[in-house]
C-alpha cells in the first residue's frame, strides 16, 4: 500500500469514526461499526493506524479542539490593533457561529461528540480542559472584560461569558427538540449569520445590564 493509500484509509476511518461516535457515543460505538462505515475496512486497521478505539477517539477530540484553537488564533492574527472591543466581539461571534453551523455535517457531528463528552466525560477531558478549554476561556474572558470594564470581577465576567456562549451553542445542542417545536425554521446552516448578529446585539445589552446590576448591588452593600 502506498503512502497516499495509507493516508486515504486513515482519513476514511477517522471520518467514519466521527459519524459513529456522534450517533452512538464512545461507549456504544464499536470497531466493527466504524470499519463498516469506512467501506469495509479491516477491523485490525484501527489498531494499525490509531492504536485502538480509545486512541482513535482521543485523536478526534484533539483535532476538534485544536481546530477551534486554530480558528481563534487566526481571528486574533487578523486584528490590526485598531478594532474596538465591540468589533472584536462581533468577529468572534461570526467565527464561532460559522464553526458550529456553517461547516456542514462534519461540524454537526463534532458538536454532538462534544455534547456527549460533557455529559459523559472520557479520560481525555482533563487534558482537553488544561490544553484547550481553559486557555480559550481565559482569552474570551479578557475580551468580555474589555466590554464590561477592566474592574469587572472574574465571577461577573465568567457568568456573562457563559451566557454568551450558551446563546450561540443552544441550537447545536438542542436542535432535535427545537426543530420539532419550530418545524418551519430554515435550519442553522442558513441562519448562522443572523444568529451572530442577534447574539451580538443581545449580549451587548446584557453585559450593560449585568454590570449595572452589579454596581447597584455593590453600592448597596
Image: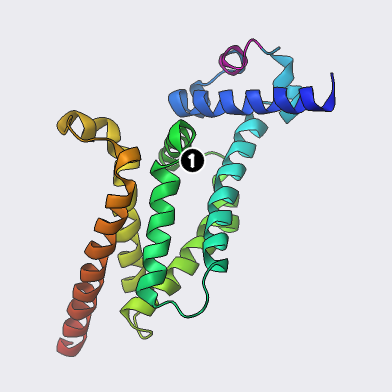
Q: Position of residue 122 (x, y in %)?
A: 54, 38
Residue name at image x 41 percent, y 42 percent: 102
Is residue 158 in view from this perspective? Answer: yes
Q: Is residue 34 magenta?
A: yes
Q: Position of residue 107 (x, y in %)?
A: 46, 38
Q: Position of residue 64 (x, y in %)?
A: 55, 43
Q: Check disc 1 and report the residue beneath it.
A: 121
Q: Position of residue 120 (x, y in %)?
A: 44, 37
| Mark 1 Cα-neighbour bin, 10 Å: few <14, some 14–19, many ≥20 | few
Is residue 154 in view from this perspective? Answer: no
In the rendered image, the vertical position of residue 181 relative to residue 204, given as above or below:
above
Q: From which residue to which does the magenta span run?
A: 33-40
Quadrant in the picture for the C terminus: bottom left
Local secondary structure at mark 1: loop
Q: Is residue 127 magenta?
A: no
Q: Is residue 32 left or right of residue 201?
A: right
Instruction: Name the quadrant containing residue 45.
Output: top right
Farthest right residue in view: 2
Farthest bottom residue in view: 219
Residue name at image x 64 percent, y 38 percent: 59
Amino acid at each position: 500500500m502506498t503512502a497516499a493509500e495509507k493516508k486515504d484509509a486513515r482519513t476514511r476511518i477517522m471520518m467514519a469514526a466521527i459519524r459513529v461516535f456522534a450517533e452512538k457515543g464512545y461507549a456504544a460505538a464499536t470497531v466493527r461499526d466504524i470499519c463498516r462505515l469506512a467501506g469495509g475496512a479491516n477491523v485490525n486497521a484501527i489498531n494499525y493506524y490509531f492504536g485502538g478505539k480509545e486512541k482513535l477517539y482521543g485523536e478526534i477530540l484533539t483535532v476538534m479542539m485544536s481546530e477551534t484553537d486554530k480558528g481563534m488564533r487566526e481571528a486574533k492574527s487578523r486584528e490590526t490593533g485598531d478594532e474596538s472591543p465591540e468589533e472584536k466581539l462581533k468577529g468572534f461571534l461570526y467565527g464561532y457561529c460559522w464553526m458550529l453551523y456553517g461547516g456542514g455535517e462534519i461540524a454537526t457531528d463534532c458538536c454532538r461528540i462534544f455534547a456527549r463528552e460533557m455529559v459523559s466525560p472520557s479520560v481525555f477531558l482533563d487534558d482537553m480542559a488544561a490544553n484547550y478549554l481553559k486557555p480559550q476561556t481565559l482569552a474570551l474572558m479578557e475580551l468580555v472584560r474589555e466590554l464590561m470594564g477592566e474592574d469587572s470581577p472574574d465571577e461577573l465576567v465568567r457568568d456573562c461569558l457563559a451566557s454568551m456562549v450558551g446563546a450561540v451553542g443552544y441550537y447545536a445542542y438542542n436542535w432535535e427538540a427545537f426543530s420539532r417545536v419550530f418545524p418551519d425554521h430554515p435550519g442553522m446552516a442558513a441562519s448562522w449569520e443572523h444568529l451572530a448578529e442577534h447574539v451580538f446585539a443581545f449580549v451587548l445589552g446584557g453585559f450593560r445590564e449585568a454590570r449595572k446590576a452589579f454596581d447597584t448591588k455593590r453600592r448597596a452593600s
